[in-house]
Image: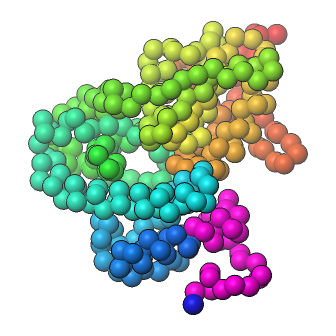
Amino acid sequence: MSPFFKHNKQPVEVPEWCSFFTEKEYLKFVEELKAYFAGQQVKFDIPKGIIHTEKEYYGHDKMGLLNVAQVCKQHKRSKYKSVIREHFETLKRSYRFNQEFDKIMHDFDSVKKYIGVRLYPVDYIPPKTKDLVLGKEIAPDIFAMLVFDLPDSVMSILKDMFDVWGRPFEEVFELGIQNIRNKYPVKISKVKSDNLSLWFAQADHFFTPNLIFELMQTGKLQGTYGSLVGMPHRHAMMIYPIENLQVTEAITAMIPAIFGMYHEGPGSLSPKLFWLYEGELIDLEYNLSETTLDFKPPKKFIEVLNQLQ
């Protein structure tokens, strides 16, 4: 019998990669994970947060578990079974679709409706593939990648594939931004806490932070002195238009919220607090501990604060 199912009172150590789980949550996660793969009659093993399958049933023989674990964390333990099943069944559907998509991906007119742009942490891209993918760094540590947004997956567009199309990069990049904007609406609402009002964007899909392109292009949700922006993960975004010295209260409120949401996930993007000013995202550096917040903004931001006094 697996040690996960022994009936004893010895504590189980939750691995570092999913330290957000309690012991009971972790045990339930492993139980449902094993049950799913047993039902699929797939042999596997679970090393440090990675599933190694016996064959490429899902398009890969190695799959990370962090995202599905983070999604489970957002639900009650009774829902883990359905979350895990949907995650891996989606991977199987994606693998089958991609096999057919491979046959048409070099025809621009056939694939242009699937072109999109998705935001990733810069360190998400392995160094050995950095020169193969297409995109641009839109903020410190955030990379806007040109992708295919397929029914059940998102796949990066590689340079050799792009070159066959013979299209200018900016044209295709803008098409990707527009496609995502048209396909994936984002709910934006104002949240009030005491005397402070923040704008909060959220959605179930992976493209909520893409709202930043609309803000940069149109000036939407920006104050006289720009806006504070947080993009902690793929499902959420926080915005505070700067008009007066109340921005100091917003900074104090937003940093812990962004930091916590980033570490909770799923689809973590950035723990940074940004200043959107004159079309540029500027990093407002900070150090956060359990007892202190050390805010270290650039000189340009301090100059703006001085104007507000």
Q: Quadrant of residue 277?
A: top right
Taking the magenta stretch, the answer to whether it contains residue 103 is no
Q: Which quarter of the figure has residue 117? A: top left
Which contiguous range is marked in magenta? 2-29
Image spot of residue 123 (x, y percent): 51, 53
Q: Nearer the viewer, residue 177 or 188?
A: 188
Q: Is residue 178 above or below residue 100?
A: above
Side of 204 relative to 249 (left or right): left
Single out the residue that lies furthest toward the bottom.
Answer: 1
Q: Position of residue 11 (x, y in %)?
A: 76, 78
Residue 170, position in %: x, y?
A: 29, 29
Q: Name the residue located 20 percent from the left edge and 36 percent from the top edge.
A: 112
Determine whether, in the image, residue 21 is placed left or right of residue 174. right
Q: Is residue 127 visible?
A: no
Q: Residue at x 54, y 60 (%)?
A: 80
Depicted 225 relative to depicted 2: above or below: above
**In-image side of 71 versus 181 (left or right):** right
Asked whether the viewer can see residue 264, the reply is: yes
The residue lying at 77 percent from left, 81 percent from top is 9
Q: Residue at x 18, y 44 (%)?
A: 163
Q: Quadrant of the C terminus?
A: top right
Compare residues 166 and 240 and report the one nearer the observer: 240
Q: Nearer the viewer, residue 205 or 79?
A: 79
